[in-house]
Image (spheres, helix red, strand yellow):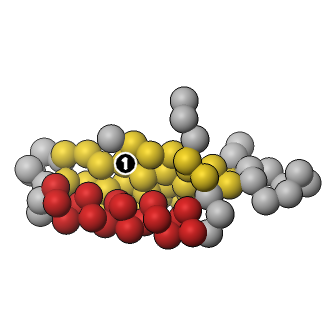
Amino acid sequence: MAVCILYRHAEKRRPRYYRVELAMNLFDEVSVLREWGISGGKGRAIVNIYANLRDASTAADRHRKRAQSRGYARITA
């Protein structure tokens, strides 16, 4: 499951993105991958590991809500 949200502050600036994804890894743990940056530029990424889906889902929702409170809006593909 992946959620991509986009932020566009002013027409002069390039749009920014923030992406949150949940994925199972090989050790029966759940990874939360977060990526962010400027569209068309070099982005950054962090992976956090959780023992179960509930904890990972709670963390992913917390990151998504924080990004949305900063002005990012969810996009649909």
Quadrant of the image containing the C terminus: top right
Say if 21 sits above or below 64 in the image: above
- Left or right of residue 62: residue 77: right
| Image vertical order of residue 43 relative to residue 51, above or below | above
Location of residue 64 (image quadrant): bottom left
Q: Where is residue 30 in the image (x, y as percent from the top left)?
A: 19, 54
Q: Where is residue 66 in the image (x, y as percent from the top left)?
A: 50, 69
Farthest residue to the left: give it: 28
Residue 49 visible in the shown view: no
**Image point 51% across, 46% down: which residue?**
4
| Image quarter hosting the N terminus | top left
**Lateral position of residue 45 relative to residue 21, left or right:** right
Q: Residue at x 89, y 51 (%)?
A: 11
Local crowd size for mark 1, using a 10 Å CA cut-off: few (<14), some (14–19), many (≥20): some
Q: What element carries label 1?
A: strand
Q: Which residue is under mark 1?
A: 21
- Between 74 and 23, the one nearer to me in the picture: 74
Q: Is residue 63 left or right of residue 67?
A: left
Q: Residue at x 26, y 45 (%)?
A: 23
- Type of amino acid at the residue the image marks with label 1: Glu
